[in-house]
Amino acid sequence: MAMTMHPSTEQIQAPSRRVSVIDIARGVALVAMAIYHFAWDLEFFGYADPGMTAYGNWKLFARCIASSFLFLVGVSLVLAHAKGIRWPGYFRRLAMVSAAALAITVATWFAMPGTFIFFGILHQIALASVLGLAFLRLPALLTLVIAAAVIAAPNYLRSDAFNHPALLWIGLSTFNPRSNDFVPVFPWFGAVLTGIGVAGLALKAGLFEKLARLQPGAWSRPLSFFGRHSLAFYLIHQPVMISLVWAFAQIFPAPVETREVTFLKSCQRSCEQSRDTDFCSRYCVCMLDELQKDDSFDRLYAADQSPELKARVGQTAAMCSANTDNQTIPGGAQ
């Protein structure tokens, strides 16, 4: 006989029919993700400035997308297993997500070894689907408190002890590893816990029963379809889009820029998140000049992640920042 986890006396029954609004919300998140990935593809092939999707509004957009996905993972866990864990379906879904995550790691290892995805959104979803089970029977408010703690943890608990490559997935290292999609446990598991907590409160209030009775119009059918087949959409859309952009690039290639120009543009965009344009122009030229005095610039573009190079870049950044400040403050050298 299959094992079940019986709901507590305070737990409210999950809705008896599918909540299409959740599928639509997941579909919206998938479309938003496709938009972001298309922008990344344009950047990757040189049709957009380097670093465009890594800073500013694009970075905020990406974080909102990831947060919404993980929030919906928490909501879905509650909706699927509020009456007791349905182990066959649970293990089938977990196996599919885990296999997809492994496939992403292997594919990106061969395609982009310097920035391969070792713990991205699918890895987080797979692990969160396991860890989340422990919170299904906790009071919803307690789960929300724990969610806040998980989200805040990187601000207080970062340590060199987590800098070992085998521990980077935890998210408490003192640096962010190079990866095209890095979604560690801290703080991102907090979004899943938030979904579990909010869904628990919604169940108790009978909100999902009301949502289940809603019948959106025909406009929602594509979004609902994407939401019901989210894993397939995730795995298929990016290979298709990047293939289309690649094919376009064979006919209408983007202007070729030197590594130096690419570095300066990326540095400028990153710097301007916290400093003014004039400072950043001087600072980035200083960084380029200093890194080219030895082989540091070449090693940086070869995706060298050695501690020695990281220390060299950090020292150069500190020196260039101080020198640029001295050039721009009243009385400083000109």
Image (tube, grey):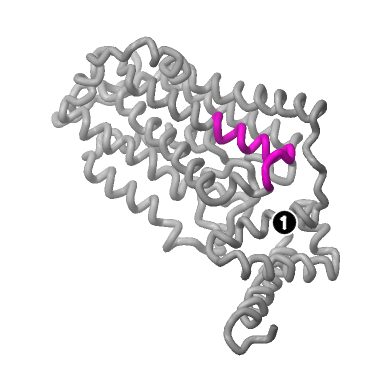
Q: Is residue 106 magenta?
A: no
Q: Quadrant of residue 8?
A: top left
The answer to whether 23 appears left or right of 83 in the picture is: right
Residue that protrudes farthest toward the right in the picture: 294
Magenta part of the chain: 34-49
Q: Quadrant of residue 129?
A: top left
The answer to whether 148 appears left or right of 291 in the picture is: left
Residue at position x 43%, y 18% in the image: 223
Q: Quadrant of residue 331?
A: bottom right
Residue at position x 63%, y 68% in the image: 278
Residue that protrudes farthest toward the bottom in the picture: 331
Main SS, magenta region, reads helix
User: Taking 221 as reference, is 65 above or below it?
Assistant: below
Residues packed near mark 1 inside 10 Å, few (<14), some (14 to 19) or many (20 plus): few
Residue 125 in view of the camera: yes
Q: Position of residue 316 (x, y in %)?
A: 71, 72
User: Taking 251 as reference, is 287 above or below it?
Assistant: below
Q: Amino acid at mark 1?
A: Gln
Q: Is residue 37 magenta?
A: yes
| Mark 1 lies on residue | 305
Q: Position of residue 254 (x, y in %)?
A: 78, 37
Residue at position x 80%, y 41% in the image: 255
Q: Nearer the viewer, residue 149 or 205?
A: 205
The answer to whether 35 appears left or right of 316 in the picture is: left
User: Taking 292 as reference, is 250 above or below it?
Assistant: above
Residue 130 in view of the camera: no
Q: Position of residue 217 (x, y in %)?
A: 33, 12
**SS for callout 1:** loop
